[in-house]
Image (spheres, rainbow, N blue to C red):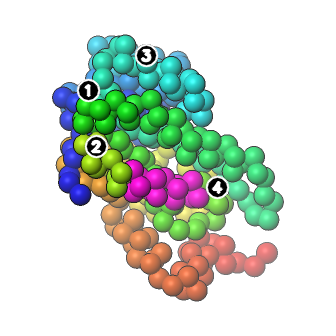
């Protein structure tokens, strides 16, 4: 499969989850690299504040990624402002911890509505035009949590594993249409979502660092950008072990091996 770098000549960029954290930092990074960027999230005030930093290059496009009709309308608004969409970054996500044995199906439902269906709602209005032009790029922000099980992450981790699979499938299918697909699998990033994580968070990086790595990956082409590598590569090796070995190791390292 070819390396298909994202290129501002293909059109504008559209980033979801852009009101804070990785999304806001990535919007700033892409603008610095010559992109015109539509920034989407539910927080209109935060988006307008972000857009005020560069009014000619950033378009505040508030919408809820879980709302299919709203995302279709948002795509039309983005195209009306900046023209064809050449890059979409599916970054919006929620982390809702689940503490077994108390299982709340609503937490799983909301997690998948945002983290998985939100990506589909972003892609549905833009992929046909990208394929018709044979220009464009899709980037999906997953997580190293998608590599394997982590405590309190049975909803979040499952959704991020689904995104890894989704990106792989789309890469296989869209290659012949001239549309690039890539994936990022960050470890712990210093964002508000991390406040709900009760277990240790080694090698945490800043949102600005994450945005730089994602932007570099978009320019370079290729499929997966995983960072920080000293952590995510270790996780990949851990989860490659037989389950009777890695599951007890994860329990021990995260503090879940202690009896109640």
Q: Earlier in the sequence, mark 3 or mark 4?
A: 3
Q: Earlier in the sequence, mark 1 or mark 4?
A: 1
Quick one: 259 or 55, which is closer to the camera?
A: 55
**Residues under labels 1 and 4: Cα distance?**
35 Å
Specify the quadrant of the image occupied by residue 238: bottom left
Indicate which disc residue 155 carries. Answer: 4
Disc 2 versus disc 3: nearer the observer: 2
Tell how many labels: 4
Indicate which disc residue 77 carries. Answer: 3
- Quadrant location, the N terminus: bottom left
Q: Main secondary structure of the magenta part?
A: helix
Q: Residue at x 54, y 86 (%)?
A: 245
Q: Is residue 112 in sight in this rendering?
A: yes
**Residues under labels 1 and 3: Cα distance?**
14 Å
Pointer 1 residue: 11
Image position of 32 with respect to 105: above or below: above
Q: Earlier in the sequence, mark 1 or mark 2?
A: 1
Mark 3 crowdedness (10 Å alpha carbons): few <14, some 14-19, many ≥20? some
Q: Which residues are magenta?
A: 157-170
Disc 1 versus disc 4: nearer the observer: 1
- Judge from the rendering whether residue 258 lies leftward or rightward of residue 247; answer left or right: right
């Amino acid at each position: 499969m070819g390396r298909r770098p994202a290129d501002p000549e293909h059109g504008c960029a559209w980033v979801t989850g852009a009101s804070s954290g990785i999304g806001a930092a990535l919007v700033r990074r892409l603008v610095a690299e010559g992109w015109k960027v539509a920034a989407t999230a539910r927080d209109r005030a935060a988006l307008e504040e972000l857009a005020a930093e560069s009014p000619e290059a950033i378009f505040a496009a508030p919408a809820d990624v879980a709302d299919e009709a709203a995302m279709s309308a948002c795509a039309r608004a983005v195209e009306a402002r900046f023209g064809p969409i050449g890059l979409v970054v599916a970054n919006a996500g929620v982390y809702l911890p689940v503490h077994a044995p108390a299982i709340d199906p609503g937490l799983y439902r909301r997690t998948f509505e945002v983290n998985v269906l939100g990506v589909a709602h972003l892609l549905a209005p833009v992929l046909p035009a990208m394929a018709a032009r044979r220009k464009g790029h899709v980037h999906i922000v997953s997580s190293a949590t998608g590599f394997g099980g982590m405590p309190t992450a049975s909803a979040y981790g499952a959704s991020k594993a689904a995104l890894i699979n989704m990106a792989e499938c789309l890469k296989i299918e869209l290659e012949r249409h001239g549309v690039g697909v890539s994936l990022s699998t960050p470890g712990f990033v210093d964002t508000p979502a991390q406040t709900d994580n009760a277990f240790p968070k080694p090698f945490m990086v800043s949102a600005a660092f994450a945005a730089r790595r994602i932007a570099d990956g978009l320019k370079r082409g290729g499929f997966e950008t995983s960072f920080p590598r000293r952590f995510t590569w270790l996780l990949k090796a851990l989860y490659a072990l037989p389950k009777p070995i890695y599951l007890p190791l994860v329990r021990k390292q995260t503090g879940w091996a202690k009896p109640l």
